[in-house]
Image (cartoon, grey):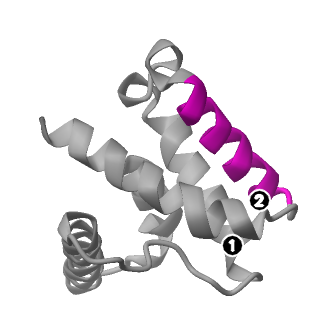
Amino acid sequence: LNTLFQLVEPTLETEKALERFVELLMLRYNATLSKLRSPDEVRLIPVEIPLLPIWADGYLTAWETNKSCWPAKALGQKGKAMRKLLERAAEGRVDQTGFANTLPDWLKQQFTAQRM
């Protein structure tokens, strides 16, 4: 959250703008939590190829700024593979199969593990 706030803070010139930003952020956060909690198959990531590198880069930025939540020792083989998938996508080398088939399941597993 700190990284995101640093990016938008210069544009938030009034308290009302800050409140609106937080409101929109919380709406997106809650929508994502609902998707992660859903037993049904839902789209967690964009399917449009031009958006995938942007999404992957944002995810990696959050990962980097919260390394204490993602210790390298705890990643395991699958986590390291997902990290590589995201890194390649952020560079524009998108693996459509990986994004469509393996990443959503891994994200749900990570979410479930955090809640326990």
Which residue sits at x=77%, y=82%? Answer: 50
20 vs 62, nearest the viewer = 62
Mark sitting on residue 52? 1
Looking at the image, the residue that sits furthest to the top is: 73
Part of the protein shown in magenta: 77-91
Name which quarter of the figure residue 49 lies in: bottom right
74 vs 1, nearest the viewer = 74
Q: Judging from the image, what secondary structure is the residue with disc 1 in?
A: helix
Q: Quadrant of the C terminus?
A: top left
* Amino acid on which disc 1 is placed: Leu
The reply to whether the magenta stretch includes residue 85 is yes
Looking at the image, residue 24 sits to the left or right of residue 87; the answer is left
* Amino acid on which disc 2 is placed: Ala
Pointer 2 local density, CA inside 10 Å: few below 14, some 14–19, many at least 20:
many
The reply to whether the magenta stretch includes residue 95 is no
Which residue sits at x=54%, y=56%? Answer: 103
User: Residue 57 at x, y = what percent?
Assistant: 66, 57
Q: Judging from the image, what secondary structure is the residue with disc 2 in?
A: helix
Pointer 1 local density, CA inside 10 Å: few below 14, some 14–19, many at least 20:
many
User: Residue 48 at x, y = what percent?
Assistant: 68, 87
69 vs 48, nearest the viewer = 48
User: Residue 8 at x, y = what percent?
Assistant: 47, 69
Q: In the displayed structure, would residue 80 be above or below residue 94?
A: above
Q: Marks 1 and 2: in contact by CB < 8 Å?
A: yes
Residue topped by disc 2: 89
